[in-house]
Image (cartoon, rainbow, N blue to C red):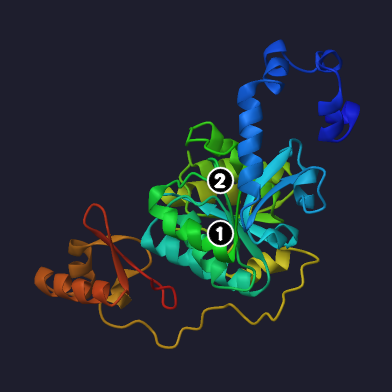
Amino acid sequence: MLRQFGLPQAVLARKRADLSGFTTPAVLAALDSEAVAHAVARSLAWAEQPGHSIVTLADETYPRPLLEISDPPALLYAHGRIELLARSALAIVGSRNATQQGEANAEALARALSEAGLTIVSGLALGIDAAAHRGGLAGAGSTIAVLGTGIDVAYPSRNAALAAEISERGLLISEFALGTAPAAQNFPRRNRLISGLARGCLVVEAALASGSLITARAAAEQGREVFAIPGSIHSPLSKGCHALIKSGAKLVESAEDVLTELSGFRPSGYASTQQTVVNADTGLLAHMGHDPVDVDSLCSRAGMSAEQVSSELLRLELDGRVAALPGGLYQRLEKGQRR
């Protein structure tokens, strides 16, 4: 319809008979229904509130990167700093069931890249998404959360406080009508917007069946750069990232790896984001390595009793240097990335 008649106003001004070749009779009938009229009135009332906007294809503020994808949304509901839609952005996505180290990595990288001037885009899910938003808010680039529900629906509820903070200091957007409840089919659909808004997509911890790989695939199809952080060969949450790297994604160990690939992007007030290791690990940490490990293995490596190892692990966990994992395993947290 847009190709045939022009902007949405021109489409809606046509006689319904002129539109019959483009959609079903039920859809045409809905255009003039009381339910749609009520939804429009509700949306216009919502848009009049401070900080609320409805951005359509006819608006100058419509994000240009979305015009490059095959199916840009006709409109976006936005709550917060609408000017962020015009900024250079990077998507950061990953597992909802992330490890503590994965969340720390996502937050640290998001913060460094935000400080370099990139706006961090993610999907407000638990785990990596939430960590990426926190990191984005900590830098000058801020963050955009793309929702898979109506913009007035708090989901997941555990991230309600984070969503409120983003609406104040960043930007919430959704293509779904007000009041749209969580539905499984809507989250893969919103993933194309996460990647579409950004110049590249960084995946942090993802299983082979992860929805994050849908976002990465959308990014590749849209001509965006795809990045992935490698992990332990024994971790299921590294399998998706390793598969991406095998298929051509750029391996990322630091923010510099991302910035180097984004040709034409000039960091703003940017300093090095490489982590500086001040002291070498000593004691039990020196025997842990970087993969998850159990108590018996640590006893063997360090020549310590189970009681000594357990006591030292508890101290390191309280100090934020070690994370306890399911199955009686423990993993070292890198310096400078403690939560």
Disc 1 from disc 2: Cα separation: 10 Å
Q: Residues within 10 Å of mark 2 (few under 14, many from 20)?
A: many
Above or below, 242 against 35 in this view is: below
Q: Is residue 300 left or right of residue 119?
A: left
Which type of secondary structure does the marked residue at label 2 adopt? loop
Q: Residues within 10 Å of mark 1 (few under 14, many from 20)?
A: many
**On-image quarter of the C terminus:** bottom left
What amino acid is labelled 1 in the image? Answer: Ser
Which type of secondary structure does the marked residue at label 1 adopt? helix
Q: Which mark is residue 151?
A: 2
Say which residue label 1 marks.
Answer: 167
Comparing 287 with 173, the one in front is 173
Above or below, 334 against 11 in this view is: below
**On-image quarter of the N terminus:** top right
Comparing 205 with 193, the one in front is 193
Tag 1 near tag 2, CB within 8 Å? no
Above or below, 276 against 142 in this view is: below
Q: What is the quadrant of residue 30 in the picture?
A: top right
Comparing 29 with 225, the one in front is 29
Q: Is residue 260 left or right of residue 161?
A: right
Residue at horizontal 60%, vertical 44%?
A: 215
What amino acid is labelled 2 in the image? Answer: Ile
Residue 45 x %, y %: 63, 44
Report the number of discs. Answer: 2
Comparing 319 with 178, the one in front is 178
